[in-house]
Amino acid sequence: QQQVKQSPQSLIVQKGGISIINCAYENTAFDYFPWYQQFPGKGPALLIAIRPDVSEKKEGRFTISFNKSAKQFSLHIMDSQPGDSATYFCAASGDKIIFGKGTRLHILP
Amino acid sequence: DTAVSQTPKYLVTQMGNDKSIKCEQNLGHDTMYWYKQDSKKFLKIMFSYNNKELIINETVPNRFSPKSPDKAHLNLHINSLELGDSAVYFCASSQAWTGNTIYFGEGSWLTVV
């Protein structure tokens, strides 16, 4: 019940394409859903986050889509660029934060 | 003006040794964490402190002992290091216990040989 399931484990996208990473949770007490981006040799850093009272949040090329009834949320990266190549973690926060297992994204130049 | 800083960044040591990783945050946050990231990139929480009090102690061997001398510092001491302890250890902090952004340090790469 405390897990956050993230897929795919790895993803290769052509430059200019759309990258989509999906996450699912079970605990309805979660009330904050952040996405973190981690470049090699660095710590994870907050990319974008959403609370369950909205269905979508957009910041530049990054969009979170949130489906409360299905208990799923996803990250969409529009016009993917080689600089977006990184590991992405979804997370869900309630009385503690639970991270997904990460998606290694590689954008082909 | 680094928000969460940890030292050392790289550490190579022999099995059986004792080592410490230090962490400091200058964000004025109440909560600090230690995370372990293995070779598969999985992020696993080890400990969490809120206002210097231990909140989370996930199933971590008691060879690992955190110490929080004040709200801005959370150090990790590891006794009798084993090969399986090789990983990247991240210190992190957040303003409050739940529902807040976690700020990570740059990591400490520990290699046990």
Image (cartoon, coloured by chain):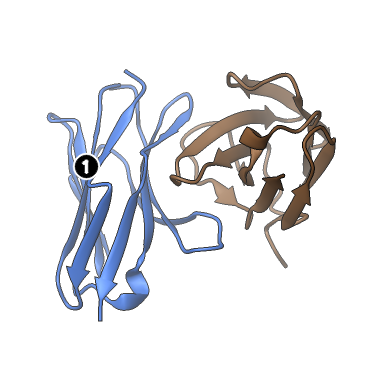
Q: Is residue B25 at least partly visible in the picture? A: no
Q: Nearer the viewer, residue A96 or B110?
A: B110
Residue type at mark 1 is Phe
Quadrant in which residue B73 is drawn: top right
Q: Residue shown at 78%/55% (left/top)?
A: B8
Q: Is residue B54 above or below residue A85?
A: above
Between B86 and A48, the one nearer to me in the picture:
B86
Report the chain holding disc 1. A
Relative side of B47 to A77, left or right: right
Q: Is residue A77 left or right of residue A70?
A: right
**Quadrant in the picture for residue A28:** top left
Q: Nearer the viewer, residue A8 or A44?
A: A8
Q: Which residue is mark 1?
A: A73
At which x and y percent is residue B15? 77, 36
Mark 1 falls on what kind of element?
strand
Q: What's the colour of chain B in the image?
A: brown
Q: Which chain is blue?
A: A
- On the image, the x and y values in percent for residue A6 come to 27, 40
Q: Which quadrant: the C terminus of chain B?
A: top right
Q: On screen, B5 above or below B14?
A: below
Q: Residues within 10 Å of mark 1 (few under 14, many from 20)?
A: many
Q: Is residue A43 above or below residue B77?
A: below
Q: Nearer the viewer, residue B85 or A43?
A: B85
Task: Residue at 15% x, 66% y: name it.
Answer: A18
In the displayed structure, does residue B89 sit left or right of residue B37?
Answer: right
Please provide percent x and percent y for residue A73: 21, 42
Question: Which residue is at 69% across, 53% downward?
Answer: B27
Q: Which residue, as the protein is rendered here, is positioned at the far bottom?
A: A109
Quadrant including the N terminus of chain B: bottom right
